[in-house]
Amino acid sequence: MTKKINRRHVLTGAAAASAFGMASTLPTHFAIAGKAPIKIGILLPYSGTYAMLGNSITDAFRLRMVMAGDTMGGRPIEYSVIDSEMSVPKAPQNTNKLVTREKVDFIVGPVHSGIAQAMAKIIGRRTSPIMVVPNAGSNKVTGELCAPNIFRASFSNWQPAYPGGEVMANDGHQTAVTISWKYAAGIQMMDAGKSGFEKNGGTVLKQLYVPFPDVEFQALLSEIAALKPDAVFSFFSGGGAVKFVKDYAAAGLKQSIPLYGPGFLTEGVTEAQGEAAEGIKTTLHYSTELTNPTNVAFKAAYEKSTGRKANVFAVQGYDTASLLLQAAAVVGGDVEATDAVIHALENTSVPDSPRGPWKMSKAHNPIQDIYLRQVVGGRHKVLGVAAEALEDPATGCKLV
Ligand code: BEZ
């Protein structure tokens, strides 16, 4: 068995377990017997409100690796997987486990911005392992905490949110209220949306927050009704987004005060949100409705291997694996040559991503298009490109 799964900490998610189970059955392992495995540590949520995100990333990451013969640069792959439980206090211990006990070459994770910041403080002080973030958008991770060995394959919180604020103003709204979870991702996205809105003539009346991952929205929905803004801008994701969008409609606000936000608000959950999601406009670096050939093939392969529809989290997992494969190929499998791997990752462009082509910024964050989408018939119809080849400002990053 080339895979190594830390069962004490992981794999509460059946999808994750089956995804990693695939590794041991592939014939390619025999062909490369004798070569030392490349070790990948995975720190993602498989329980709680972000479980869908962690499972989507994991399954698509594994899909990409299996498509590549389950080898990197001609070497087998060994995984150590930890359920982050979305716990910021446990993040240092979990990270140190992967770094010092499992001695991984790469860390893939996390989903949650607070955990990403805790991990970056540990990883960024070292020369290895190399961390590739497959979701968490914390601006700081590719800003003041940026480091040579930290890369992101997803987005910064600023990237989908700032154009969302611009869209809201361009739609003619003059006042807005923001509402989100009170933690790094929610605060950074709401501030970016506010800034995009106000730079285009709008005024944010109030910024409302609930603690993460609470889903008791009634008091704040009553406050929104009393404030009577023209529009509401919001970040929730996963299970919390299902509850918020349904509660918003049930409170009678959907018809009178249109809801906007970064695309996480409806991504991967439109089926569960049902009618309540119809008409919501969001901005994101992906839509399942993109017609590029890679996306068409990716969606079919993902659906075939998981029985579930693709979403942005899956795309980010897929692209994370593509990055690692590219870098390992450039160094001929010698991933211990960290400087050469970093150099390869820095010079990566991903011309064939399901989201459309993107490349790595100097701060190690994707430069990518942000699409304007609207939920129509349960799908994310693409209305246009809200921001072309958008690069995060990377405030405070010394690599830039
Ligand atoms: C974050 O914490 O960075 C995050 C979580 C879910 C969706 C998007 C961002």
Image (spheres, rainbow, N blue to C red):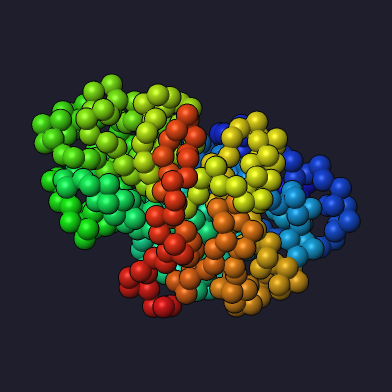
> Who is closer to the viewer here, 306 or 214?
306
Q: Which quadrant would residue 32 be assigned to in this image?
A: bottom right
123 w.r.t. 113: above or below:
below
In the shown orientation, is residue 119 left or right of residue 188? Answer: right
Who's the residue at 56% across and 73% down the image? Answer: 346
* Residue 319 in which image quadrant: bottom right
In x, y percent, where is residue 77?
A: 72, 55
| Residue 176 drawn above or below residue 226 | below
Q: Can residue 119 be seen in the rendering of this structure? A: no
Q: Can residue 346 be seen in this view?
A: yes
Residue 71 sits in quarter: bottom right
Question: Image check: 1 left or right of 400?
Answer: right
Q: Give x and y (percent) for residue 51.
A: 49, 36
Please, is residue 96 above or below residue 256 in the view? below
Along the line of sight, the residue nearer the viewer: 323 or 150: 323
Q: Residue furthest left?
A: 226
Compared to residue 364, the image places residue 98 above or below, namely: above
Residue 39 at x, y = what percent? 66, 58
Q: In this view, does 57 lie to the left or right of 235?
A: right
- Which residue: 53% across, 59% down? 153
Q: Residue at x 16, y 39 (%)?
A: 229
- Count of number-bearing discs: 0
Query: Residue 122's x, y, as percent?
Result: 44, 64
Q: In which quarter of the image is the C terminus?
A: bottom left
Position of 265 with respect to 38 (left or right) is left
Q: Residue 319 versus residue 114: which sits nearer the camera? A: 319
Between 102 and 47, the one lying in front of the other is: 47
Extreme-right residue of the structure: 31
Q: Residue at x 29, y 37 (%)?
A: 259
